[in-house]
Structures are given as structure tokens and as C-alpha cells.
């Protein structure tokens, strides 16, 4: 038997623009995680995946080619050079990461599958191989993923991500704290990404200007994080949110939580991930975490996670 785990994640700066070659910053969130247990099966032949929390069972044999869980298993076996795996296996999946909420739930489940399966087969894969397999699964979830989710989750460390550039982990010179509040509104990243693409096709000059501004802001955030200038990170979050609003990926529910976070003293706040719903993040002082958490819940947040970066 083997177990594999993977954390959730949030994007601090740069979502959407990252799909168009600009940099983005993401950090793992270890307060939530996906877990996969792989064991030899006795009751049925073949490879079966169970997700009891959501009442799903997937048989590898009969699943459609683009079913994400079985695709991840097939790609893991292929990466290990196993063409046909005759031995019956049972994979049980649990996850505390909210689904369709910008916290990388799909990438985390896929990462935990790859880790547990490769471990069970006696050949654990490294982060680079895990990330590459999970990227293939992300294509099913997202259409045209930038690769940021699989990277931050498989490497399990803060990253500055830019398509086509080597992975750049970073170090926060001073720790800072985030409140992550879930609007409870599920939102499919694929739809938000497709709408931004349609807007870009209609008016590329306007969208490229926005992406450029986001890219510059991400560069500034990287310098501020690495230089320990935590005070400027809040303003950069607010500026990023203004630009995401211009891209029309915010929502009334996100805006309501952002307003509450500001009112309660957060230094900055923005949506995180695909937007339209899902989670917002706010830069907070640890001393005010409990007050902000209560205010966000009172304003309708489904859950609030407080996490430390650095
Ligand atoms: O919604 P999430 O957490 O999967 O984040 C998506 C981030 C986007 O930049 C909108 C898309 C991408 O592939 O990078």
C-alpha cells in the first residue's frame, strides 16, 4: 500500500495574464490537501478509482480517454514504461480542497494520484515528472492551462512561473499572512479562460495592455517579497484586482468579500485563480486574523483559511 498527498494553492499575482506569457506568483496552501491511497485490490479486476466523498467510482478500462482521474493513471503508467498493468489495484481519493474554487483541487488530486501510484509501484517520480503528467490532466480541466497549478503543487514551494522559462522557486525575506475566503460560488476556470480569450480576440490591444500591466506588477511583487517589503504587497494586490476587474473575471460575491477585508483592515485583497467565484485572498496582520475571519464568514464566506507565506 502507498499514500500520496498534495497541497492546495493560491495565485498571489498574475492569473490570466500568465496564460499569455506573463509571469505569475503562486504558493502552496498546506492547510488543505488531497490524499490518495493505492492498494492491491482483491474484489474486482483492473484498476478502479474511488472518490467516496463525492460518490464517484471510475474503472480504468471503461472510462473515456479524457476522464481526468483515469487519464492521470494511464499517463503515470506510461511514464513508468508500463504498457499493461495486469495486477488489480484500488485507488481511494479524499480531498479537503474546495472544488472549482481557484485552489487547484484538480491538480492536487492528480498530483496525489501520481505520487501514490509511482510509490506503490516502487518507482517514485520526481517533481518534474509529476508536474509534466499533471499538466496533461490540467489540459482536460482547463483547456489551455499555463502550467502554474501543476508546477506550484508538484514542486510544493512558492514559485514565480512564466511559460517557457525554468521553474523559479522564491524565498520570502519576511513572512506574511493571507486570509483565503471562499465565496462558495463554484466557477469553472475553463469558462473564465475562454471568455478572456474571446475578449483578447475581439480587442487584442486592450487586453495586451492589461496583461502587460499585470506582468509589471508581478515583477514588482517579486522584488517586494524577496526584499521583505511586505507593506507594498497589499497595494499591488489591489492594483492586480483593478486589472482583473477590467478583464471581467471578478463577481459581486468576490467584490463583497474584498470590501469586507478592506473594511476590517486588510492591506490589500484580490480574487485568486480563474475568478467569477471561488476564492479571494487578503493580505492581513496575524493579530487581526480572527477578527477578519469572523467578518468574512458573517459576510457570507463559506470558509476562511489563514496561512503564512515564508
Ligand atoms: O482557477 P485556478 O486555480 O485553476 O487558476 C487558474 C489560473 C489561470 O491563470 C486563470 C489559468 C491558468 O492556466 O493559468
Image (cartoon, grey):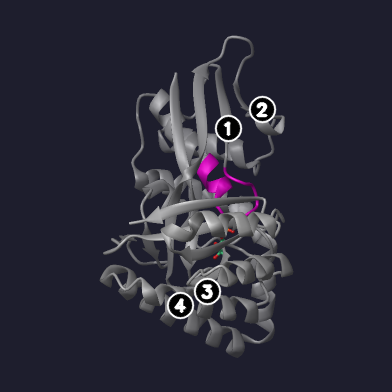
Element carrying mark 4: helix
Q: Quadrant of residue 287?
A: bottom left
For the N terminus, the image quarter is top left
Crowding around mark 4 (Cα neighbors within 10 Å: few <14, some 14 to 19, many 20+) is: many
Residue drawn at 70 percent across, 34 percent down: 54
- The residue beneath circle 4 is 236
- The residue beneath circle 1 is 94
Is tag 1's residue or tag 2's residue first in the polypeptide sequence? Answer: 2
Is tag 4's residue or tag 3's residue first in the polypeptide sequence? Answer: 3
- The residue beneath circle 3 is 17
Give the x, y percent position of residue 278: 64, 58
Is tag 2's residue or tag 3's residue first in the polypeptide sequence? Answer: 3
Element carrying mark 3: helix
Residues in magenta, as a range: 97-109
Is tag 4's residue or tag 2's residue first in the polypeptide sequence? Answer: 2
Is tag 1's residue or tag 4's residue first in the polypeptide sequence? Answer: 1
- The residue beneath circle 2 is 52
Numbered disc in front, either 4 or 3: 4
Distance from disc 4 to disc 2, alpha carbons, whole Å, reads 41 Å
Distance from disc 4 to disc 3, alpha carbons, whole Å, reads 15 Å
Q: Quadrant of residue 233?
A: bottom left
Q: Are marks 1 and 2 in contact (CB under 8 Å)?
A: yes
Element carrying mark 2: helix
Is tag 3's residue or tag 1's residue first in the polypeptide sequence? Answer: 3
Crowding around mark 1 (Cα neighbors within 10 Å: few <14, some 14 to 19, many 20+) is: some
Question: In screen coordinates, is 195 left or right of 156?
Answer: right
The front one of 196 and 302 is: 302
Distance from disc 2 to disc 3, alpha carbons, whole Å, reads 36 Å
Numbered disc in front, either 3 or 1: 1
Residue drawn at 32 percent across, 62 percent down: 166
Amino acid at each position: 500500500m502507498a499514500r500520496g498527498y498534495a497541497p492546495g494553492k493560491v495565485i498571489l499575482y498574475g492569473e490570466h495574464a500568465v496564460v499569455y506569457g506573463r509571469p505569475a506568483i503562486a504558493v502552496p496552501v498546506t492547510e488543505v490537501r488531497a490524499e490518495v491511497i493505492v492498494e492491491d485490490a482483491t474484489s474486482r479486476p483492473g484498476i478502479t478509482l474511488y472518490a467516496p466523498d463525492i460518490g464517484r467510482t471510475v474503472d480504468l478500462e471503461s472510462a473515456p480517454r479524457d476522464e481526468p482521474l483515469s487519464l492521470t493513471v494511464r499517463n503515470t503508467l506510461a511514464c513508468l514504461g508500463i504498457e499493461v498493468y495486469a495486477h488489480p489495484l484500488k485507488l481511494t481519493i479524499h480531498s479537503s480542497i474546495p472544488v472549482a474554487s481557484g485552489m487547484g483541487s484538480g491538480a492536487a488530486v492528480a498530483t496525489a494520484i501520481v505520487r501514490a501510484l509511482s510509490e506503490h509501484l516502487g518507482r517514485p517520480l520526481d517533481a518534474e515528472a509529476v508536474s509534466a503528467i499533471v499538466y496533461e490532466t490540467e489540459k482536460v480541466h482547463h483547456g489551455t492551462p499555463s502550467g502554474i497549478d501543476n508546477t506550484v503543487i508538484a514542486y510544493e514551494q512558492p514559485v514565480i512561473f512564466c511559460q517557457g522559462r525554468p521553474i523559479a522557486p522564491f524565498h520570502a525575506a519576511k513572512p506574511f499572512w493571507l486570509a483565503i475566503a471562499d465565496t462558495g460560488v463554484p466557477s469553472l476556470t475553463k469558462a473564465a479562460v475562454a471568455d478572456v480569450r474571446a475578449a483578447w480576440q475581439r480587442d487584442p490591444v486592450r487586453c495586451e495592455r492589461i496583461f502587460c500591466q499585470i506582468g509589471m506588477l508581478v515583477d514588482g511583487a517579486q522584488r517586494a517579497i524577496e526584499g521583505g517589503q511586505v507593506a507594498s504587497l497589499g497595494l499591488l494586490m489591489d492594483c492586480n484586482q483593478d486589472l482583473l476587474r477590467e478583464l471581467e473575471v471578478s463577481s459581486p460575491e468576490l467584490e463583497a468579500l474584498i470590501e469586507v477585508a478592506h473594511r476590517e483592515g486588510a492591506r490589500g485583497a484580490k480574487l485568486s485563480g480563474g475568478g467569477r467565484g471561488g476564492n479571494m485572498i487578503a493580505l492581513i496582520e496575524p493579530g487581526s486574523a480572527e477578527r477578519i475571519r469572523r467578518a468574512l464568514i458573517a459576510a457570507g464566506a463559506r470558509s476562511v483559511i489563514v496561512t503564512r507565506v515564508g
